Amino acid sequence: MTRHILITNDDGIESDALAPLADALSAVGDVDVIAPERNWSGASHSITLFRPLRVRSTKLRGTGHPAYMTDGSPTDCVRLAVLGFLRHRPDLIVSGINRGANMGDDITYSGTVAAAMEGLLSNIPSVAISIGAFGADLDFGPAASFAALLARNILERGFVPDSLLNVNVPALPRDQIAGVEVTRLGKRSYRDQLIERLDPYGNPYYWVGGPAVSEDAEEGTDVAALRAGKISVTPISLDLTNHALVDELAQWDWGWSAPVEISAG
């Protein structure tokens, strides 16, 4: 039985990571590519509601693999595929390969992870995969090979319907990668700054951002695994409920005549 794999990303259709990923996954199933026409890094789970989406056919740079590009977000790419733009519903969604790691708190901003979340919401097994480096001339081969291995495992074994896999691959040659570790999310904090400047007409504009200044490299986290030269695989659930607080909050004085109910399990 032919398996259909959708590839998308948040770095845009011009990303040089798309071609090696498509080549690797083509050995596992039929590959469709729908990617944004521009970079949507940091877009999180945004969707387009109040204007039409434009989609154009194209070919991936370097291989000529057929693809589609849209003026929508990474999440829009998945929605297009799932809601009928393609002739077949994807059996697996792979989002990436993203330039720069998506670990810890980063996943709440990541368009790469958000696209995989949209796949999860559509009950399709989904993977977000990133490489732990920026810049030109990155070797995406090891990450693409691992994505194909993961895809084969998921399609042959099946996967739970309530989680996606967030993968971070060190920017190392294949023979220098120290292994694979199943991890939990770590923590990253940033020294963000607001920088105000003036345009040629005297109007102010702003840059917001800053470098990561500290990371929780506690053993068992995605941060620690990547630092150790390992591929990090983190299962991510969409249930954001803090279950440990449910009973405590039920004891608060809510100033309401009806009793407080506990509905979370």
Image (cartoon, helix red, strand yellow):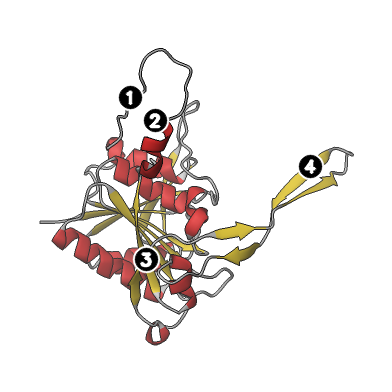
Q: Secondary structure at mark 4?
A: strand
Residue with the mark numbered 3? 183
Q: Earlier in the sequence, mark 3 or mark 1?
A: 3
Dot 2 and dot 3 residues touching (CB under 8 Å) = no
> Which quadrant would the N terminus be assigned to in this image?
bottom left
Cα separation, mark 4 vs mark 3, equals 40 Å
Cα separation, mark 2 vs mark 3, equals 32 Å
- For the residues labelled 2 and 1, say whether their Cβ atoms are less than 8 Å apart: yes
Which mark's residue is nearer the viewer, 2 or 3? Answer: 2
* Image disc number at residue 261: 1
Between the C-alphas of marks 2 and 1, the distance is 7 Å
Residue 264 is situated, as x and y percent measured from the top left of the image, at 30, 34
Three-letter amino acid code at the position of disc 3: Thr
Q: CA distance from mark 2 to mark 4?
A: 46 Å
Residue 125 appears anywhere in the view: yes
Q: Residue 128 is drawn in which quadrant?
A: bottom left
Task: Indicate the amino acid at tag 4.
Answer: Tyr
Q: Nearer the viewer, residue 79 or 264?
A: 264
Tell me which label, 4 or 3, sits earlier in the chain. 3
Residue lying at the far bottom in this picture: please name it: 175
Q: Which residue is mark 2?
A: 250
